[in-house]
Image: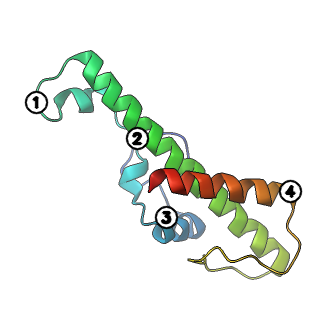
Amino acid sequence: DNFETSWKTEQPLNSPRSLKVCAKYGITAGELVQKPLQHFMLAGGAVSEAVARRRWEHAEGKRQQKLNLLRAERQEMIEQEQQGGVPVTPRRSRTPTLNASSPARESARRHRDSQQQRLS
């Protein structure tokens, strides 16, 4: 899994699938890097630790939502490749396919769609 929960570098992504999925959703690698609490204490002037913590929690929640969305889409891409034997370019539209879907894929798709709506 190329979407780790936290990273220490600015460019953590290196797999072609991960890069394709990020590009599909317009998410940059920098958005997926976990920022320390100190970042929020220094950003925008001096703020209390409580305010900085709330900002950090909000940013971390959004980051986790993005990671979950990207993981689900990447997993779907892997499953499609395994079924068809050829790499699949991510689709922009979510049109249903004619072949039967597994319950796990449907669950991942529903999760991804709900996450995508929250990010909008």
Q: Report which quarter residue 87 is drawn in.
A: bottom right
Task: Between label 1 and label 4, give the one nearer the viewer.
Answer: 4
Which residue is drawn at the image coordinates 78% and 67% (left, top)?
79
Upstream in the sequence, badge 1 or badge 4? 1
Q: Report which quarter residue 88 is drawn in.
A: bottom right
Whole-percent x, y for residue 47 in the image: 17, 22
Q: Considering the numbered disc 2 on the image, is that residue within a helix, a strand or a loop?
A: loop
Do the CB atoms of the residues marked 1 and 4 lie less than 8 Å apart?
A: no
Q: Considering the numbered disc 3 on the image, is that residue within a helix, a strand or a loop?
A: helix
Whole-percent x, y for residue 55 in the image: 31, 31
- In the picture, the disc for residue 45 is 1
Q: Considering the numbered disc 4 on the image, is that residue within a helix, a strand or a loop?
A: helix
Whole-percent x, y for residue 120 in the image: 44, 57
- In the picture, the disc for residue 103 is 4
Q: Name the residue under label 2.
A: 8
- What amino acid is found at the position of numbered circle 3 in the picture? Cys
